[in-house]
């Protein structure tokens, strides 16, 4: 191969005494991978005659590019040579590998000579092109090395290595060695911000070839998958917790002391994505309960959810736009609470002193402490009135205690209503009322009322005793209205045995009632139970996995076709296992209101 050459002489024409020759030279452009070829046509005469003065048409073709020129009165003396009669310059592109062989042809013709032609080829000196390379793996993790091997070609040119992801190109290695392994490292900090929604991206490793004076003469690139370490996750800097119910904060003297059944806990999570990612989801998990939102502020209403009492651990998990997660545990101090309750409440007339009414009572009040200090004080107010009156009289007010006591000087011919009200710092007042009849009389009467077992006071018929003490047709009113097995619904915590008689038990605690249905196996037996307060959603992925195809036909899970930026129509792979979508239980409760259910058992 060369940068100049000759094609010819070729003889012909009349008397076979005329000749044509092509002389060529080339100037190469390394960066452009082409040569500018200049060719010239020379002619000669080999006989003793003279050249007739005629118009002569000379054609010259270089690498298929042809043109001609007509010469008038072109004179060529006998046995002489006319050099460079016609010249042209044509740009000849080299092959991608840098080599090139091109065709040359020329001809002359006129009415005297006829036509004389010559043809041949020229081989141009190779122009060194881009270096090729090999690699250890076509999947590389950011901030981890990948091994390259650049094959030398003896050209004296240099090579640099670049990473290109989404159109952003970064120099990774300058002036690489040849024919020896060396490591390059893609830096997460260079590319993560342009892939805020992806944990893996498709890009290129590019080896560019430069002349010693810095001209880029070509490049070789290969498709790579760039992945992020599992340690690249969002961060949680703080989770603030506070009580939203002002009354509770006032009572406890704390914004982080919570009361079961009453508190509203607000959790505010401060979290940040990493390398351009954003937080897309916040989840609070407490025991079997799970609350998910796109907001960083979540409220847990303890009147709706039972999270337990004591030091309760809540796990806050944030998920960023790459699907990466971070979690933190916070401790919630929840104290048990029930509304105050009056226990063992009995009101009777003294058998010896009928003008004395004995009141027996005790209370149950939840203890709420901030440290060692009791915060839930309470009062017990006992009132009485004659049954026929409307105005109540306060008999006793007690603070943080409840004692038995007696009312004296009470009229023997009157019935009395006794009312006890308990009020603590957290709940509304709880009031329980009972009645004590007048002294026992088989029968008494007034102008409007007949009394049986007591003094006549009100109504047409005023009967002493409970429903269980009154019989009609041999059957007690208790059995008529509340036969054994009957259920009584009330908001009064007092056992019905104290007011209407019989033996009762609390029934269906924490459960709703469903009508029996003999045709439905779930509801065909009295007393059957079922259902659940929380339920876990488990949605599996289709089949065993979702399969995507790399450019090199490897398999991957959970793939999607990207559409934006430099990633259009490329496959994005996220290496995640085939796991249920959400295996944590969610709340399954219908709206409800609680009451006391009592069932008569005797």
Image (cartoon, rainbow, N blue to C red):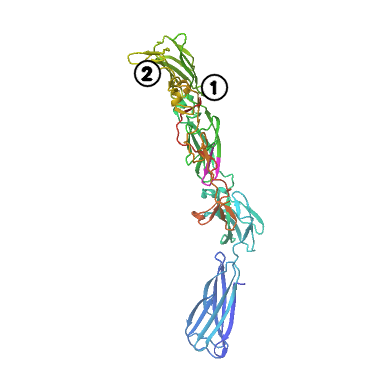
Q: Is residue 444 above or below residue 550?
A: above
Q: Position of residue 95 (x, y in %)?
A: 57, 69
As displayed, is residue 21 above or below residue 523? below
Magenta region includes residue 506: no
Front position in the image: 462 or 388: 462
Res 205 → quadrant: bottom right
Viewer-side residue, 253 vs 394: 394
Closer to the chain start, of discs 2 and 1, is 1
The front one of 190 and 332 is: 332
Residue drawn at 48 percent across, 30 percent down: 263
Magenta segment includes 317: yes
Residue 566 location in percent, x, y? Answer: 51, 55
Residue 226 in percent (x, y) is at 58, 52
- Which quadrant: the N terminus? bottom right
Residue 162 pos. (x, y %): 57, 55
Residue 54 in the image: above or below residue 120: below
According to the image, label 2 marks what residue?
A: 461
Taking the spot 53% from the left edge, 56% from the top edge, the residue there is: 570
**How far apart, in angstroms, are the residues tagged by discs 2 and 1?**
57 Å
Write down the residue under mark 1. Answer: 372
- Mark 2 burial class by Cα count in 10 Å: few <14, some 14-19, many 20+: some
Label 2 or label 1, whichever lies nearer to me, is 2
Q: Is residue 149 left or right of residue 324?
A: right
Q: Which residues are magenta?
A: 315-326
Secondary-structure class at tag 2? strand
Q: How many marks?
A: 2
Residue 169 visible in the picture? no
Prevailing secondary structure of the magenta residues: strand
The outermost residue toward the front is 473
């Amino acid at each position: 191969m060369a940068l100049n050459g000759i094609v010819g002489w070729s003889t012909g024409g009349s008397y076979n005494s005329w000749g044509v020759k092509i002389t060529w030279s080339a100037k190469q452009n390394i960066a452009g991978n082409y040569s500018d070829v200049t060719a010239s046509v020379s002619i000669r005469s080999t006989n003793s005659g003279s050249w007739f003065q005629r118009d002569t048409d000379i054609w010259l073709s270089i690498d298929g590019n042809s043109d001609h020129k007509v010469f008038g009165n072109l004179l060529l003396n006998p046995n002489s040579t006319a050099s460079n009669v016609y010249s042209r310059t044509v740009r000849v592109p080299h092959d991608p590998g840098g080599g090139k062989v091109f065709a040359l042809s020329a001809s002359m013709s006129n009415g005297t000579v006829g036509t004389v032609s010559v043809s041949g080829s020229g081989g141009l000196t190779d122009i060194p092109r881009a270096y090729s390379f090999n690699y250890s793996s076509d999947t590389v993790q950011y901030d981890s090395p990948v091994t390259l091997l650049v094959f030398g070609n003896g050209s004296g040119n240099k090579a640099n290595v670049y990473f290109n992801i989404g159109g952003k190109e970064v120099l990774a290695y300058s002036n690489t060695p040849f024919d020896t392994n060396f490591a390059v490292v893609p830096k997460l900090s260079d590319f993560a911000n342009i892939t805020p929604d992806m944990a893996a991206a498709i890009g290129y490793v590019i080896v560019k070839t430069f002349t010693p004076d810095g001209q880029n003469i070509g490049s070789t690139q290969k498709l790579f998958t760039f992945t992020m370490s599992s340690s690249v996750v969002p961060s949680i800097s703080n989770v603030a917790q506070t009580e939203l119910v002002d009354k509770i904060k006032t009572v406890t003297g704390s914004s982080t002391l919570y009361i079961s059944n009453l508190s509203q806990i607000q959790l505010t999570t401060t979290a940040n994505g990493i390398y351009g990612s954003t937080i897309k989801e916040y989840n609070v998990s407490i025991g079997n309960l799970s609350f998910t939102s796109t907001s960083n502020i979540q409220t847990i209403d303890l009147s709706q959810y039972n999270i337990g009492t004591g030091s309760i651990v809540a796990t806050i998990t944030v998920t960023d736009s790459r699907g990466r997660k971070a979690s933190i545990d916070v401790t919630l101090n929840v104290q048990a609470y029930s509304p105050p309750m009056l226990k063992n409440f009995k009101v009777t007339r003294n058998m010896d002193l009928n003008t004395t009414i004995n009141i027996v009572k005790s209370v149950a009040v939840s203890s709420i402490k901030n440290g060692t200090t009791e915060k839930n004080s309470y009062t017990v107010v006992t009132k009485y009135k004659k049954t026929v009156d409307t105005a109540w009289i306060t008999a006793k007010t007690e603070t943080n205690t409840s004692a038995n006591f007696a009312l004296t000087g009470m009229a023997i011919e009157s019935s009395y209503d006794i009312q006890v009200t308990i009020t603590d710092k957290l709940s509304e007042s709880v009031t329980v009322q009972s009645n004590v009849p007048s002294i026992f009389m088989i029968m008494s009467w007034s102008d409007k009322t007949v009394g049986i077992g007591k003094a006549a006071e009100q109504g047409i018929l005023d009967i002493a005793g409970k429903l269980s003490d009154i019989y009609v047709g041999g059957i007690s009113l208790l059995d008529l209205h509340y036969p054994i097995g009957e259920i009584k619904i009330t908001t009064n915590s007092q056992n019905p045995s104290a007011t209407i008689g019989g033996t009762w038990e609390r029934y269906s605690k924490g459960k709703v009632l469903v009508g029996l249905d003999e045709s439905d196996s779930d509801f065909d037996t009295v007393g059957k139970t079922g259902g659940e307060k929380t339920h876990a959603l488990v949605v599996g992925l289709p089949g065993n996995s979702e399969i995507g195809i790399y450019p090199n036909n490897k398999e991957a899970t959970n793939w999607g076709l990207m559409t934006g930026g430099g990633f259009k129509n490329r496959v994005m792979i996220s290496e995640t296992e085939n796991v249920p979508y959400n295996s944590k239980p969610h709340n399954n409760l219908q709206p409800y209101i609680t009451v006391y259910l009592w069932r008569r058992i005797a």
